């Protein structure tokens, strides 16, 4: 969904931030921004129909209006990756929040070492940005691996967990920064696999998802341990949240 | 379509990642009766229910592990490639494959003989223990994969 303002201008955003999208009469939902940060004239969101508000949002037709508050949240820290190898691991709808970061990396490609993207989805038909992925996969300055949980015989790509791709991924662990986004169990297993290869836990960042209401740290709806995801996250260092991820429910 | 198996293999088990760090003489013994397999896309390595009489070391290509449920199309539950190993149903009775294995693209394997393996693992418990220690993480990873698939973590 591409949005342009009916008045004023689009405030700049950092990769990893989110907006609150409002469908009149139904309510608001937090959706990460997934467009190109160098294109300040539009707001891009990828929405999958999963509830009352999101299913109304996917039905929005060109010319209709949607309420937008934001951008909110901390975003992916960019400075730790200067001069380092960078690994992005996305699961399912975890790719949209990482896409602005990938645009940013590709726009300043000479500032980083190797760039490895691993993207896992439930099945081939659940892959988002399929055409764009094909373009990324043929680039020589990036390795973009795709794997699905299960597939039919018409799929010639990889089947398996994203974690299975970590041992062969091309990066030097001691000079690597990793950014993870997806289901929490997938991020936890991926962070463990990265640590096993020697990546430091404070060089791993992940985006936590919680239901949001106020999005400005007032209502406590998005509490995650001692922090609020809307204000202190959604991006956290794995070192900081590791103890919480070991618990069944936070 | 079932590919092509030939004796006098040029591929060596000792060159495969699975056997890194093993005693060379032990690996040589295990390789007695090994067959080199060449497969094209679509070729079956084996079918569910058939005797599990080989342990496959993958050197090139990609293999899909497929499961079939009655009245449903076959699904690939995992793909494996160079450096991976395939199959442990030969290790314990009833020695029958529990899934199909099919080449997704041009693939080369070294298929060790299961009877030789079992006899040598029995005869040399220390090496046999090392072998099982190497195989166990492969089994554990596949179980974890199955667990994630059951949880359907990417489902909405
Ligand atoms: S949504 Fe209200 S505190 Fe985070």
Image (cartoon, coloured by chain):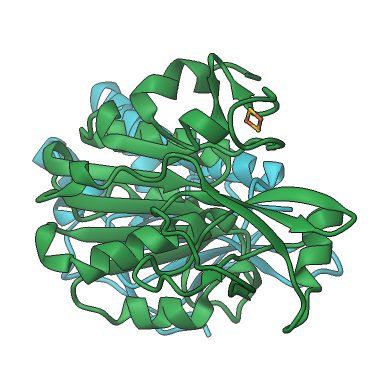
Residue A8, horizontal then vertical, whole percent = 54, 68
**A202 to A89, vertically: above or below:** above
Residue A202, horizontal then vertical, whole percent = 27, 28
Residue B91, horizontal then vertical, whole percent = 48, 40
In-image side of A181 versus A123 (left or right): left
**A169 to B10, vertically: above or below:** above
Residue A237, horizontal then vertical, whole percent = 36, 30
Chain A color in figure: green
Q: Which residue lies furthest to the front in this view?
A: A8
Q: Which of A99 and B106 is in front in this view?
A: A99
Chain B color in figure: cyan
Residue at x-position 68% and y-position 37%: A212
- Tell me which image quadrant ligand 1 sits in: top right
Q: Which of B154 and A93 is in front in this view?
A: A93
Residue at x-position 28% and y-position 47%: A167
- Which picture quadrant has residue B121? top left
Q: Nearer the viewer, residue B61 or B30?
A: B61
């Amino acid at each position: 969904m591409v949005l342009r303002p009916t008045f004023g201008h689009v405030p700049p955003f950092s990769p990893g931030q989110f907006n609150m999208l409002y469908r009149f009469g139904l309510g608001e939902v937090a959706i990460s921004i997934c467009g190109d940060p160098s294109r300040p004239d539009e707001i891009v969101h990828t929405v999958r129909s999963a509830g009352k508000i999101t299913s109304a949002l996917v039905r929005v037709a060109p010319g209709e209006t949607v309420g937008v508050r934001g951008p909110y949240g901390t975003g992916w820290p960019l400075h730790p990756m200067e001069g380092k190898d960078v690994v992005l691991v996305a699961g399912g709808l975890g790719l949209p929040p990482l896409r602005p970061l990938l645009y940013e990396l590709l726009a300043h490609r000479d500032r980083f070492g190797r760039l490895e993207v691993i993207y896992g989805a439930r099945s081939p038909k659940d892959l988002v940005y399929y055409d764009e992925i094909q373009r990324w996969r043929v680039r020589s300055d990036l390795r973009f691996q795709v794997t699905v949980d299960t597939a039919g015989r018409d799929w010639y790509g990889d089947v398996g967990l994203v974690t299975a791709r970590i041992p062969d991924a091309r990066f030097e662990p001691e000079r690597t920064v990793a950014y993870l986004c997806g289901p929490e169990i997938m991020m936890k297993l991926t962070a463990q696999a990265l640590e096993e290869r020697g990546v430091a836990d404070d060089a791993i960042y992940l985006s936590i998802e919680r239901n949001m209401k106020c999005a400005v740290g007032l209502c406590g709806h998005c509490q995650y341990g001692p922090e609020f995801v809307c204000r202190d996250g959604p991006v956290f260092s794995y070192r900081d949240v590791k103890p919480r991820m070991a618990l069944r429910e936070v | 379509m079932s590919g092509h198996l030939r004796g006098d293999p040029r591929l060596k088990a000792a060159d495969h990642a699975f056997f890194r760090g093993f005693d060379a003489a032990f690996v040589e013994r295990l390789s007695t009766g090994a067959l080199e397999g060449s497969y094209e896309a679509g070729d079956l390595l084996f079918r569910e229910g058939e005797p599990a009489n080989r342990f496959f070391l993958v050197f090139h290509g990609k293999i899909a592990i497929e499961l079939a449920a009655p009245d449903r199309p076959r699904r690939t539950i995992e793909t494996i490639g160079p450096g991976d190993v395939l199959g442990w149903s030969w290790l314990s009775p009833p020695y029958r494959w529990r899934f199909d294995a099919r080449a997704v693209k041009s693939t080369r394997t070294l298929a060790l003989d299961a009877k030789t393996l079992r006899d040598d693992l029995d005869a040399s418990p220390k090496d046999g223990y090392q072998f099982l220690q190497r195989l166990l993480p492969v089994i554990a990873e596949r179980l974890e994969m199955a667990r994630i698939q059951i949880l359907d973590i990417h489902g909405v």
